[in-house]
């Protein structure tokens, strides 16, 4: 057997009373709705039947509105065109300027873009070697070393054209422009 203390008994009693009140409210509201539905549905012919059957018949009998009894809607001709396009933008009077105030400005074509120039030579001269009538040049570019002979290509962008004791002459292939790298770490110059 389970023992309940007085607080638990009060709580269960209050819950039971609340449940019972809720059930009564649901039944009471349901009857009012049923009466409202019965009152709003007209019947075609009143009949005498037992009270339970009368309610069922009243629920199932619905009077329909005859469409042919509806009047046709008539439009007034004074209303104008119903589907006319309208604009909400205000209409402004067109301004006419005297001919003397009109200034015609000739449009200058934009200046041509400057001619492309090759980038500065990225190489640093390290040295050269001559073997079997061929001159080889040793170059450094960003920590990478290149060895190329006269007429050879570097990265498919530069060709070595001439090497002497003072300078190495390159051709920048994309623009076909000659550039010179001076030996003894002097600045490189461009020759066009």
Image: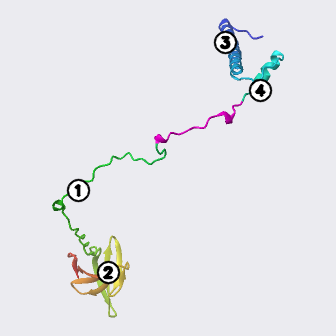
Q: Which numbered mark, 3 or 4, is in the foreground of this view?
A: 4
What residue lies at 67% left-to-right and 33% top-to-bottom? Answer: 69
Q: Which residue is mark 1?
A: 96
Residue 39 or 76: which is nearer the viewer? 76
x and y percent of residue 66 in the render? 69, 33
The span shown in magenta is: 64-79
Q: Which residue is mark 3?
A: 18
Which residue lies most toward the top here? 6
Q: Which numbered mark, 4 or 1, is in the foreground of this view?
A: 1
Q: CA distance from mark 3 to mark 4?
A: 36 Å
69 inside magenta stretch: yes
| Marked residue nearer the N-terminal end (3 or 4) | 3
Q: Which residue is mark 2?
A: 138
Residue 46: name its quadrant: top right
| Marked residue nearer the N-terminal end (4 or 1) | 4
x and y percent of residue 63 in the render? 72, 28
x and y percent of residue 187 in the render? 20, 75
Q: Which numbered mark, 2 or 4, is in the foreground of this view?
A: 4
Specify few, some or many for label 4: CA neighbours under 10 Å numbering under 14, 14-19, or 20 or more. few
Secondary structure under tag 2 reads strand
Q: CA distance from mark 2 to mark 1?
A: 77 Å
């Amino acid at each position: 057997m389970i023992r309940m203390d007085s607080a638990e008994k009060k709580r269960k009693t209050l819950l039971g009373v609340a449940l019972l009140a809720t059930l009564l409210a649901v039944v009471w509201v349901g009857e009012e709705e049923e009466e409202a539905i019965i009152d709003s549905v007209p019947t075609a012919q009143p009949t005498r039947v037992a009270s339970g059957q009368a309610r069922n018949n009243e629920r199932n009998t619905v009077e329909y509105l005859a469409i042919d009894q509806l009047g046709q809607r008539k439009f007034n001709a004074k209303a104008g065109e119903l589907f006319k396009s309208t604009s909400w933008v205000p209409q402004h009077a067109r301004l006419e300027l005297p001919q003397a105030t009109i200034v015609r400005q000739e449009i200058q074509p934009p200046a041509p873009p400057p001619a492309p120039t090759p980038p500065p030579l990225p190489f640093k001269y390290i040295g050269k070697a001559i073997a079997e009538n061929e001159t080889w040049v040793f170059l450094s570019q960003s920590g990478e070393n290149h060895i190329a002979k006269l007429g050879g290509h570097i990265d498919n962008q530069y060709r070595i054209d001439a090497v002497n004791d003072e300078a190495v002459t390159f051709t920048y292939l994309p623009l076909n422009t000659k550039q010179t790298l001076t030996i003894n770490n002097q600045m490189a110059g461009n020759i066009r």
